[in-house]
Amino acid sequence: QVQLVESGGGLVQPGGSLLLSCAFSGTILSVRDMGWYRQAPGKQRDVVAIITSDSTTTYADSVKGRFTISRDNAKNTVYLQMNSLKPEDTAVYFCNADIRQSQDTTVDYWGKGTLVTVSS
């Protein structure tokens, strides 16, 4: 079994910054794609950013130029640096990872989420 634990959420004023972290622990052979998703109240969960095993990144149009996803494979951790935050960034942020646990088994795991609130 694998656990994903997010941290770094909180209340921030518009224009501020936050750094989200997501650490994985458990039976891990390797981690393939990692990503961050968010879900605002009353809305569906949407992708924010993805980073592949070779560190190729993709972003939602709404966060391009403001958010940066990165990974530390040695620490089994994925980060999301969020700058120039806007009220519309308010949501619960979830990390996601495709984790290879054996030669034949790759499982998609989710964290429990961390709340980011952007408000003055």
Image (tube, grey):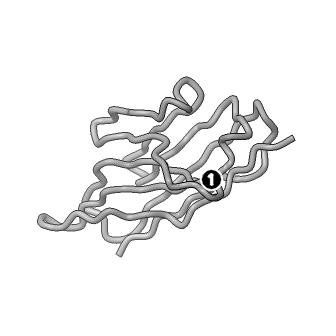
73 relative to 61, above or below? below
82 relative to 11, above or below? above
Q: Residue at x 57, y 55 (%)?
A: 43
Residue farthest toward the bottom in the current orientation of the protein:
1
The quarter in which the N terminus is drawn is bottom left
Circle 1 — which element?
loop
Q: Residue at x 78, y 35 (%)?
A: 14
Task: Return the x and y of residue 69 as percentages of the image width and height.
Answer: 48, 37
The quarter in which the C terminus is drawn is top right
The reply, left or right, for residue 112 in relation to residue 90 is: left
The reply, left or right, for residue 9 in relation to residue 27 is: right
**The quadrant where residue 57 appears:** top left
The reply, left or right, for residue 49 in relation to residue 90 is: left
Q: Residue at x 45, y 33 (%)?
A: 59
**The one of 10 and 41 positioned closer to us in this rendering:** 41
64 relative to 71, above or below? above
**The quadrant where residue 76 appears:** bottom left
Task: Return the x and y of residue 10 as percentages of the image width and height.
Answer: 74, 53
Residue farthest toward the left in the current orientation of the protein:
104
Task: Return the x and y of residue 34 as percentages of the image width and height.
Answer: 38, 49
Q: Which residue is mark 1?
A: 40
Q: Amino acid at mark 1?
A: Ala
Residue farthest toward the front in the current orientation of the protein:
42
The reply, left or right, for residue 78 in relation to residue 53 is: right
Q: How many marks?
A: 1
**The quadrant where residue 26 appears:** bottom left
Task: Return the x and y of residue 24 as percentages of the image width and height.
Answer: 43, 61
**The one of 104 and 118 positioned closer to us in this rendering:** 118
Q: Residue at x 30, y 60 (%)?
A: 99
